[in-house]
Image (cartoon, rainbow, N blue to C red):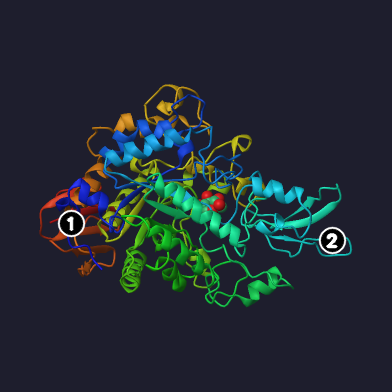
Amino acid sequence: MSTTATLATLSDSDLAADPNWWRQAAVYQIYPRSFADSNGDGLGDIKGITAKVPYLKELGIDAVWLSPFYPSALADGGYDVDDYRNVDPKLGTLADFDEMAKALHSAGIKLIADIVPNHSSNRHEWFQEALASPRGSAARDRYIFRDGLGENGDLPPSDWDSVFGGPAWERITEPDGTPGQWYLHIFAKEQPDLNWANREIRDDFLKTLRFWSDRGVDGFRVDVAHALTKDLTEPLLSKLELTEANSGTDGFDDGSHPFWDRDEVHDIYVEWREVFNEYNPPRTAVAEAWVHATRRARYASPEGLGQAFNFDLLQADFDAEEFREIITRNLAEAKQTGASSTWVFSNHDVVRHATRYGLPKAAKGPADKKLAKGQDGKAWLLAGGPKDELDVELGERRARAATLLMLAVPGSAYLYQGEELGLQEVADIPDSERQDPAFFRNKGVEVGRDGCRVPLPWKVEGASFGFGDGGAHLPQPDWFSKYAVEAQDGTNNSTLELYRKALKLRRELQAEEELEWIETGNPEVLHFSRPGGWQSVTNFGDTAVDLPAGTVLLTSDPLEDGKLPANSTVWLR
Ligand code: GLC
């Protein structure tokens, strides 16, 4: 299943119609509220994105993935959706959306919309109707309502925790004012879980998929794709029973969890695929599914969503052996399913990789596999981001090296806004300014994800560093100035120029989805080639190494006396 023509040999109209456009696409994630603010209200918006289309084109990406832009009270940064078929008035209008889609398409950039099917917001008209309707009503059946335990029903139906901390059940007040039933929310209490056993929910989402596809959306990123179907047959297992029943080392590996990764979830995606295939080219989808590695491929099947995020590199340390194992395994898996692999280092949910890689490596204890999962930076954030533990320069060098390596591997590469600037995580956001429900619901355990969601710096100085004429909805530190687009644009060896060159070359060099490892005799150095003689070498070690034969195309940092320095990558041909 490899594309035979290279992207460079396809015209723009061929590309627009190419059903395989997604296989090796570089996809740039925009977190709309923090990208660019056109009206100075401190929140990024749709018009702000449209104004930056020339920037995106020059960057050289193939597609934009837009995080939720729907009407929302922002209890979870927009992942609490009030209306699936509209644009948040704080961000613009449907007409603004159409204009943005048109501008992106004219620039040869595809558009992927984030879709949030597991839960709506508590302000959604369905939930409001459920609150106003009696027990057992059709309106309640769109969500997951249960009577409480105990004599007066004042204990939750189970002791489950929500992902953001605190209980996963919330009690409501019945229309007559008495304490009432409980509803399930795997995430924040403002995000009630929808009941996917209800046909009306299924049909309504098919309508939503067509609504955006008709407006020119080329694909969908499916939020929490692994949670939609649930088996809540009573009695519900307790937390302890669930832990004991966990057969895998890294999550359930047999589909027996009451809500994560049940086999029936794929029936939903078979229906979605039928809708995707009504379009030409078919709409694409990528699953966000944090499941046991052995079960990820099911989400990526061509009869289902077609592609699934692989977060393995994101969870790895900057380590040659780990990188090689992950790449080898995932490429083999992709071959089996017919999907292409996906690669990602940063997104709106994790500490930026330029910061993670500047932190000491995680202790590798075989006793605790989770610990070995490494440089995730959460503990460092919780400690207030101690400066003496972070080596900013090292983090940025490694991030550039890792990204250049990733962009040479077959598959699609997902990039998160600001990483092309080498942007660091903001660790010192005052508690009073934090927005993430993970901070409020999980006090003292983690500080949440606001540090990677701070509005981008476009200019070296001025109001909110060019983000907009007003302020920024999360505080930008002074050091943002040196990362600004303006500071890096046209500057030799800047991270931005590196991304631009790499993305351009990647299009020219991209060939069949093959990779061949070349043994280096040095466990700290990874070397591979792609068809057509494109080679990538990464030095994970502490000392410079000799280059193999070939013409140097690009380096993540300048060579040292003709050698590849520590923590850097070179492309050759
Ligand atoms: C996904 C999103 C995350 C959100 C959660 C609940 O994991 O990436 O940002 O908080 O789903 O919708």
- Three-letter code, disc 1: Thr
Quadrant in which the N terminus appears: bottom left
Quadrant in which the C terminus appears: bottom left
**Which residue corresponds to mark 1?**
6
Query: Is disc 1's CB within 8 Å of ligand 1?
Result: no
Q: Residues within 10 Å of mark 1 (few under 14, many from 20)?
A: few
540 lies above or below 302: above
Q: Position of residue 266 (x, y in %)?
A: 49, 68
Where disc 1 sits, the SS reads loop
Report the disc number at residue 153. 2
Q: Residues within 10 Å of mark 2 (few under 14, many from 20)?
A: some
- Three-letter code, disc 2: Gly
Q: Position of residue 174 (x, y in %)?
A: 81, 50
Q: Nearer the viewer, residue 488 or 167?
A: 167
Report the disc number at residue 379. none
Q: Position of residue 182 (x, y in %)?
A: 75, 57
Q: Position of residue 317 (x, y in %)?
A: 41, 59
* Measured Cα–Cα span from mark 1 to mark 2: 63 Å
Residue extending furthest right? 151
Badge 1 or badge 2: first in the primary sequence: 1
Examine the rendering and report whether any part of residue 350 can be seen. no
Q: Nearer the viewer, residue 449 or 183?
A: 183
- Is 168 on the left or on the right of 487, as rendered? right
Question: Residue drawn 57% across and 78% down?
Answer: 247
